[in-house]
């Protein structure tokens, strides 16, 4: 399985994200979660929950990094 590498010089901020940044292609999703290739309704529900949980982690991470920067100012 291919691993993705993301290099950022600055911390990610939620207000910097656009809808395009948050959109994943089907190939990208299946590359990190190959067992979702089975397209049954149950597997698709699992996939939706999987992506939702990832988005919550990213949102919280961005919110936490913004809060800590605000405390320093």
Image (cartoon, helix red, strand yellow):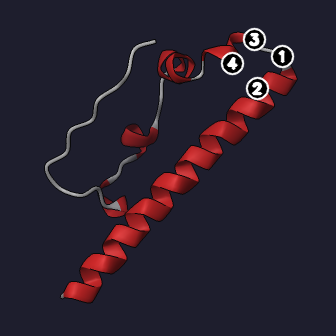
Q: Do tag 2 and tag 4 residues touch (Cβ < 8 Å)?
A: yes
Q: Do tag 3 and tag 1 residues touch (Cβ < 8 Å)?
A: yes
Point out the image quarter for the C terminus.
bottom left
Crowding at mark 4 (Cα within 10 Å: few <14, some 14-19, many 20+): some
User: In the rendering, which numbered label is found on residue 38?
Assistant: 3
User: In the rendering, which numbered label is found on residue 40?
Assistant: 1
Q: Secondary structure at mark 4?
A: helix
Q: Which residue is mark 4?
A: 36
User: In the rendering, which numbered label is found on residue 44?
Assistant: 2
Residue 15's x, y, as percent? 33, 62
| Vertical order, 42 against 54 (above or below) | above
Residue at horizontal 37 percent and vertical 60 percent from the top? 14
Q: Do tag 3 and tag 4 residues touch (Cβ < 8 Å)?
A: yes
Residue at horizontal 42 percent and vertical 44 percent from the top? 19
Query: Gap in Å between the C-alphas at discs 2 and 4?
Result: 7 Å
Query: Gap in Å between the C-alphas at discs 2 and 3?
Result: 8 Å
| Vertical order, 5 against 3 (above or below) | below
Tell me if 71 is positioned left or right of 24 in this view: left
Query: Gap in Å between the C-alphas at discs 1 and 4?
Result: 9 Å
């Amino acid at each position: 399985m291919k691993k993705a590498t993301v290099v950022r010089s600055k911390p990610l901020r939620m207000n910097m994200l656009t809808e395009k940044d948050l959109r994943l292609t089907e190939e990208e999703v299946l590359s990190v979660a190959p067992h979702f290739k089975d397209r049954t309704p149950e597997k698709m529900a699992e996939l939706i929950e999987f992506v939702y949980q990832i988005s919550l982690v990213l949102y919280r991470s961005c919110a936490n990094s913004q809060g800590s920067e605000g405390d320093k100012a």
